[in-house]
Image (cartoon, rainbow, N blue to C red):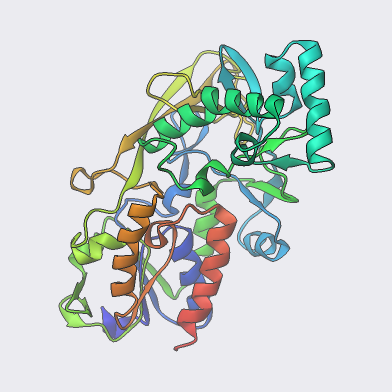
């Protein structure tokens, strides 16, 4: 393998594909090995038996404030504007997420709702949003009451189901990901660039990987090819002479010697419904439901012709067990888990020719644009050694 290859990449997701294309454009021979039967990682989508475009691993949209990242994706396909809207069902009512002034109107009587919005203006001034964490710490009784309501009815319940642990244990950054808005503004993101591919994410990846210098081997487990032993990287039993980018869970490389890194897995129950519209938004969170966290209606992401049918995916969080071939989706960010990860990272960062990158290897909760930005930086770092 090393004789015909300048760079070996483990994983054909966003990080691996960006680095592969960058290196291939420099004239380097790249070999990607992928455990799954398809390219595109968790962004993989396909057309189902009803003719609907479905995302296999949950809903993805591309959004960013960085025009350079937006320009990057334009190289490999046509995109169209798409602004994601989401809702949550609380006490049988559907309300926008992020929560906004409509949420106040939905759950408060008119006079109290007006008083709460006036109090928010007095305390937060011209601020457009804040986090639930900051509101929970407010010294104002009315704002604290509203924050407690949101936390008890949504944030705490959703967090406990999604992560399988108490909200008190989870890293505070997770609770801060979805803000509380101080207006009637809707839309899950406020980035200036919000798009979906005109054809599909898989087509975007096909274009990115369409280079004569890139070879892809699917259904190939990296653990059968690369090993780390006594601080040395081996490829098919020989000491690595070429750089290797690894985008998987890094505890696998060291045979879980420091323990199994805790990720959260997911199961999706896909259903075809005989209706043009199943729910009022593409993605709806159900914090009070038993077992599942949210439902995605794929005929709304992107919008597709329904003709009396639609397809939805009910999302169930699961415990992750690498021995049961579960997919690791999200790292469970706690102080204890981060400490375990640092043990792996410190050891692997000292292995010659080995590079780590991506959501799993970095043990980070990345948005797509963050993944892309870091992949470009990693590409430059790896290729600087050629």
Front residue of 148/93: it is: 148
Q: Residue 71, percent across and down?
A: 69, 63
Residue at 21 percent across and 56 percent down: it is 259
Residue at 70 percent across and 16 percent down: it is 106
Front residue of 251/235: it is: 251
Q: Residue 332, percent across and down?
A: 38, 47
Q: In which quarter of the image is residue 132?
A: top right
Q: Residue 310, percent across and down?
A: 54, 21
Q: Is residue 337 left or right of residue 92?
A: left
Q: Is residue 361 above or below residue 90?
A: below
Q: In which quarter of the image is the N terminus?
A: bottom left
Q: Is residue 285 visible?
A: no
Front residue of 38/265: it is: 265
Q: Number of numbered discs present?
A: 0
Q: In this view, does 73 lie to the left or right of 182?
A: left
Residue at 47 percent across and 38 percent down: it is 58
């Amino acid at each position: 393998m090393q004789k015909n290859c300048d760079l070996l990449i483990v994983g054909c997701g966003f990080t691996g594909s960006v680095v592969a294309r960058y290196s291939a454009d420099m004239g380097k021979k790249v070999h990607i090995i992928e455990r799954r039967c398809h390219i595109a990682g968790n962004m993989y989508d396909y057309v189902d038996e009803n003719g609907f475009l479905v995302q296999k691993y949950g809903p993805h949209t591309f959004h960013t404030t960085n025009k350079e990242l937006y320009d990057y994706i334009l190289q490999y396909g046509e995109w169209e504007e798409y602004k994601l809207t989401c809702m949550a069902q609380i006490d049988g009512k559907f309300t926008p997420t992020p929560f906004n002034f409509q949420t106040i109107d939905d759950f408060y009587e008119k006079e109290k709702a007006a008083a709460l919005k006036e109090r928010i203006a007095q305390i937060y001034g011209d601020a457009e949003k804040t986090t639930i964490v900051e509101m929970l710490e407010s010294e104002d009784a009315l704002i604290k009451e509203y924050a407690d309501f949101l936390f008890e009815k949504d944030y705490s319940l959703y967090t406990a189901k999604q992560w399988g642990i108490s909200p008190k244990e989870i890293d505070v950054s997770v609770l801060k990901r979805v803000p509380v808005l101080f207006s009637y503004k809707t839309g899950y993101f406020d980035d200036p660039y919000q798009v979906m591919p005109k054809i599909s994410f898989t087509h975007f990846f096909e274009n990115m990987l369409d280079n004569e210098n890139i070879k892809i081997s699917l259904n190939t487990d990296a653990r059968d090819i690369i090993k780390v032993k006594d601080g040395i990287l081996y490829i098919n039993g020989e000491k690595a002479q070429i750089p290797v980018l690894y985008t998987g869970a890094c505890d696998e490389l060291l045979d879980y010697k420091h323990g199994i890194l805790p990720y959260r897995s997911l199961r999706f129950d896909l259903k075809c419904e005989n209706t043009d519209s199943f729910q009022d938004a593409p993605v709806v969170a159900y914090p009070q439901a038993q077992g599942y966290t949210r439902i995605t209606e794929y005929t709304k992401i992107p919008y597709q012709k329904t003709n009396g049918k639609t397809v939805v995916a009910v999302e169930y969080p699961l415990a992750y067990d690498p021995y049961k071939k579960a997919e690791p989706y999200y790292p469970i960010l706690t102080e204890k888990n981060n400490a375990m990860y640092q043990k792996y990272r410190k050891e692997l960062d000292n292995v010659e020719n080995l590079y780590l990158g991506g959501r799993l290897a970095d043990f980070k909760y990345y948005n797509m644009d963050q993944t892309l930005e870091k992949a470009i930086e990693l590409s430059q770092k790896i290729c600087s050694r050629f």
